[in-house]
Amino acid sequence: MKNEYIPVRSKIKEVIKHTNLEYTFRMEFDGDVKPGQFFEVSLPKFGEAPISVSGIGEGLVDFTIRRVGKVTNEVFENYVGDSLLIRGPYGNGFDIDNFKGKEIVIIGGGTGVSPMRGVIQYFASNPDEAVSTTLIAGFKSPDDVLFKADFEEWEKSINVIKTVDNAPEGYTGPVGMVTKYVPDLKFKDKANAVFICVGPPIMIKFTIMEIQKLGIEDQQIWTSYERKMCCGLGKCGHCKMGDKYVCLDGPVFNYTEAKELFD
Ligand SMILES: Cc1cc2nc3c(=O)[nH]c(=O)nc-3n(C[C@H](O)[C@H](O)[C@H](O)COP(=O)(O)OP(=O)(O)OC[C@H]3O[C@@H](n4cnc5c(N)ncnc54)[C@H](O)[C@@H]3O)c2cc1C
Ligand code: FES
């Protein structure tokens, strides 16, 4: 019988450096995977970290990792150019069909853009499959912007507002939190709008408050929840909130469910 906890070794094919703290690791992987799903990435003796899929390609997946502690430090220090242990994909991920034919607004903060990148790529490559697609992405400063090359591509086919909290003198792009840009959104038919919002919990909270002020209903809003996890398989109970296992039932939730889960 297959032991679900045993990871497989995956070669790092490429490392894309976005900032000093955030790199994308392009990994070998054969199998079905959806944007918004995650893998447990591990190193012997250092532990495991759940990491979202930020890109999907032929025989590969991307992980965009922020260096914050034990596992992620080790990955950055010693494993660039080598291999990592991975198991997954886990979780439900985003269902692209929920967004087709809609007026889509995708709002991301920092690494929160990662799990939504596959959805953004899909509608940037197939703009006719939505009535409109708008991306509002917020980063701390111009130096903290992730996926710079992607933004240049996305701007060609969808509406993009790439904003920074703090800008140096002379900066000409949008400045301010993502919430600043929500009240100005215009829709042909508000009932056909759909929002996806992912980022730090505080950003999600205030962004959803702004979205609701537009008269958008809870069922029109989707989010992804980075609850601390352990097994990723619905066995250990670490991620359990109410009657939900975030690793199994999520991490993507419609806001009708997510609003009951936020701490
Ligand atoms: C479903 C899911 C998807 C994720 N996707 C990504 C991703 O795509 N890229 C990415 O960089 N990170 C992602 N994370 C967060 C990532 O798992 C943690 O940053 C990582 O586990 C930290 O491991 P570490 O050993 O390096 O740090 P540790 O030494 O364990 O911790 C360092 C610091 O990070 C905090 N921390 C640890 N885990 C989390 C967490 N889950 N949420 C918030 N704070 C945490 C700790 O409290 C501590 O302050 C995701 C988490 C979940 C649950
Ligand atoms: S992480 Fe173990 S049950 Fe979800």
Image (cartoon, rainbow, N blue to C red):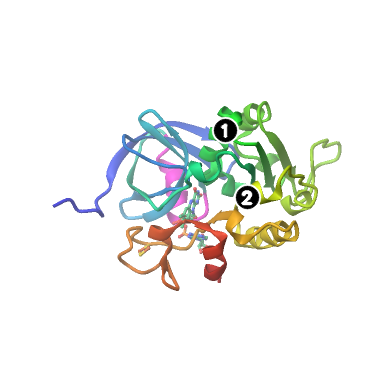
Q: In the image, 64: left or right of 248?
A: right
| Amino acid at the residue labelled 2 | Phe
| Amino acid at the residue labelled 1 | Glu
Residue 8 quadrant: top left
Residue at the spot of label 1: 129
Reply above or below: 151 against 176.
above
| Local secondary structure at mark 1 | helix
| Residue 107 seen in render | no
Q: In the image, 91: left or right of 187?
A: left
Q: CA distance from mark 2 to mark 1?
A: 16 Å
Q: In the image, 137: left or right of 170?
A: left
Label the magenta part by its dominant secondary structure: helix
Q: Is mark 1 within 8 Å of ligand 1?
A: no
Going 40% across and 40% down the picture, which residue do you hit? 79
Residue at the spot of label 2: 195
Residue range in magenta is: 67-80
Residue 203 quadrant: bottom right
Residues at marks 2 and 1 touching, judged by CB atoms closer than 8 Å? no
